[in-house]
Amino acid sequence: MSSTLFPTVLWAQRKDLLYVTVVVEDTHNEEITLTENKLTFKATGGVEKATYAVELEFFAEVIPQESKKSRTDRQYFFLIRKKDSGSYWSRLLKQSGKPHYLKTDFNKWKDEDESDSEMDDLGGPGGGDLNAMMQQMGGMGGMAGMGGMAGMGGMAGMGGAGPDLGNLGDDEEDSDDEEMPDLEKPES
């Protein structure tokens, strides 16, 4: 196959870092260049052993000497240090618009207004430690151990033991309680 394909590129960022993942399986003949302004990737790979290439001209400058890369059988992972740490970029690329091969890596994404301490206080992303989260929210008095709901008697504060359903007429025989007739044989 002589045509060049675009690999899928995933990205996320922090104030001082970019996470860039180039997804191509079983690569060979890799040519990778990282400069202050761009990342160039070219390799042969995939099931069809096609040539994959992409040039990412960054929104702002990066520091290639302080950046790292690693490889697995399925992808190349780049941890790229931003030159201007402390600000989030509005996009990865200098060009406006989003190329079809570029996707947000939501597994690594973190919004600008999320702080590291906020994530730690809640026990990690998504607030894994609910007790800590509840304490930060002012608590909900009596939730620890679910006290006050022992035995669920009347659903604690739900106003009694519920409605009296009384006799629902179970004494009467329903018409669908009759025996089913045998199946008839089809006429030939």
Image: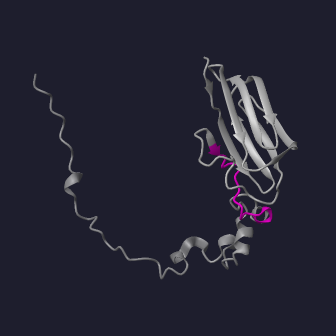
* Residue 13 visible in image: yes
Who is closer to the viewer here, 34 or 18?
34
Q: Is residue 59 magenta?
A: no
Q: Is residue 164 above or below residue 59?
A: below
Q: Is residue 109 magenta?
A: yes
Residue drawn where x is 69% and y is 71% of the image: 145
The number of discs equals 0
Q: Position of residue 6 (x, y in %)?
A: 63, 31
Residue 169 found in image quarter: bottom left
Q: Is residue 109 above or below residue 121?
A: above
- Residue 148: image location, x then y, percent: 62, 78
Residue with the most extreme right position: 65
Q: How is the image coloured?
A: one colour
Q: Residue furthest top?
A: 1
Question: Which is more toward the observer, 134 or 167?
Answer: 134
Residue 24 visible in the picture: no
The residue at the point 67 percent across, 51 percent down is 91
Residue 7, located in which quarter of the rendered image?
top right
Q: Position of residue 187 (x, y in %)?
A: 10, 25
Measured as percent of width and height from the top left, residue 137 is found at 69, 75
| Residue located at (15% from left, 28% from top) | 185
| Residue 99 vertical placement versus 147 (above, below) | above
Which image quarter is the C terminus in? top left
* The N terminus, quarter of image: top right
Question: Residue furthest toward the left?
Answer: 187
SS majority, magenta:
loop
39 sits left or right of 49 in the view: right
In the image, which residues are magenta? 103-118
Look at 81% across and 47% down and name the residue there: 62
